[in-house]
Amino acid sequence: MRLFGAVSIILLIVAAPFVRDWIAPKAIYVQEPGYQLTGHRYLYDERLGWRNIPKWQATTYGHKLTINSLGMRDREYSVQKPRGTKRILVLGGSFTWGFGVSDEDIFTEVLEAKLAEFDGDHYEVLNTGVSGWSTDQELLFLIDEAFQYDPDLVVLSFNMPENPVYNVNSVQFGLAKPMFLDTDLQLGNVPVPEPGSPYPRLKCNAEEVELTFAILAKMADVCASRGCPLVVVKFGAFHYRHHADFRDVAVVQTELKKKDAKFCESMHRNPKITMLDLDQEFEAHGFSLDQLLAGNFDGHWNAFGHHEVGVILHQFLARQRMLGPERERSTAAK
C-alpha cells in the first residue's frame, strides 16, 4: 500500500573538530521523495537496512512526528525499566510507526492511556515500529536490541497480505534490506549495501508464507526463552475484502481467504503465540473501510482507526489475562 519507490540519498559526515586523530563514523541518511509530507527519513543501518533517526522531529502529512533519543516514535524512556513498571514493546512497520497520524493518535499511545485508566500497574508501551520494516527486520531488532528494555510482553503488528511478500525481497521501497534465504533462517544481504552502491536482488529459496511462519516461530522461541509472551496482531484481510478495487474480484478474494485461513491455523498451532485477529474484530464492530482509512494515505489507518485498534488491543489483553495481577494469577495457575 506504499506508493513511494525511488529514494534520494543524503550523506552527512560528522567530525569532532577539536579532537586530534579522531574521525567520527559517517552517518548516512535516506529519504523518500516527498518526505516533507510523509516524514519518511531514515538512518542507514548495515544490519537492518534502515531505522528511525534518533531525536528526529518533523511532520507526517502535517501531523506532529517525533522520534525519541532511542529511535522510537514515542516519548522519552529510560533504557532501564523503572521499578514497579511493566512494559509492552510493540514491533511493526508503517501501521505501528503511525503513517499519516500525529504522535498522540497512534494506537500504542491509545493503549498506554487505556492501561493507565483501567489497570492498577504502571505501564509503558514502547513503540519500536519503523515505516517500511517487515517481519525479518523486526526479528533482527528483537534479537539484537529489544530485550535491553526488559519488556513484560511483546506485541507484533503483522500485515497478513503484504508482510510475507516483503520478507522474500532484498530490496523494498527502493531500499536494500536483510533477507532470510530459507526456512532455516540463513541470513543474506548483510551487511546491507550502502545507499548509492549496487543493490543485489537475492533469491529466496523458500515460499513466502512458509518463510514467514519460520520467522514468526523464531520470534516466539526468542520471547519464550525470555519468559515474555508474544502477541501477534494480524490485520490486512479486511482492507482487501472491502476495498472497491478488490471486493468483487473472485480470484483475489479466494486466494486471500486461503492465505488468511492458513496463517490463522499456523498461529493457533503454536502454543508460544497468542493471536489477535483484527480483521475479525473490524467485521464484528461493523466498521466500514472508509471509517478506518478516510483522510489518510496509502491505505493506512486514520486517527479513528488507530483509536479503535488501541481499544480493541487493550480489551483483548485483558480478556487473555495478560495484564498485571491477572497475568500473574494466570501464570501461577499453569
Image (cartoon, grey):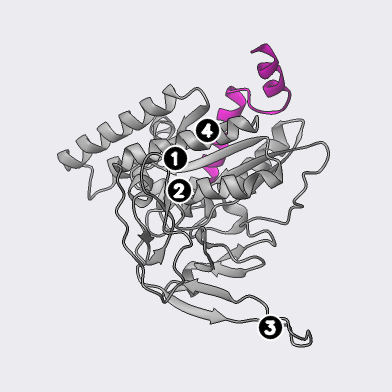
- Give the percent coordinates (x, y) of residue 97: 53, 54
Could you classify mark 2 by the number of other residues whose Cα lies within 10 Å: few (under 14), some (14-19), or many (20 or more)?
many
- According to the image, label 1 marks what residue? 215
Q: Nearer the viewer, residue 179 or 312?
A: 179
- According to the image, label 4 marks what residue? 220
Q: Residue at x 70, y 46 (%)?
A: 149
Q: Quadrant of residue 142?
A: top right
Res. 3 in view: yes
- Give the percent coordinates (x, y) of residue 221: 54, 32
Q: Give residue 136's mark.
A: 2
Compute the Cα span from label 2 to label 1: 7 Å
Name the amino acid, label 3. Ala
Quadrant into which the N terminus falls: bottom left
Inspect the magenta stretch and tell me whether residue 312 lies in it.
yes
Compute the Cα span from label 4 to label 1: 9 Å
Q: Nearer the viewer, residue 174 or 203?
A: 203
Residue reaching furthest to the top: 333
* Residues tagged 3 and 1 counted as in contact (Cβ below 8 A): no
Quadrant into which the C terminus falls: top right
Name the amino acid, label 2. Asp
Q: Residue at x 53, y 73 (%)?
A: 29
Compute the Cα span from label 2 to label 4: 13 Å
Query: Where is 260 relative to 236, above or below?
Result: above
- What secondary structure prevails in the magenta region? helix
* Residues tagged 2 and 4 counted as in contact (Cβ below 8 A): no
Query: Where is 63 relative to 212, above or below?
Result: below
Query: Where is 232 relative to 58, above or below?
Result: above
Residue reaching furthest to the left: 250
What span is colored magenta in the figure? 306-334
Q: Give residue 15's mark.
A: 3
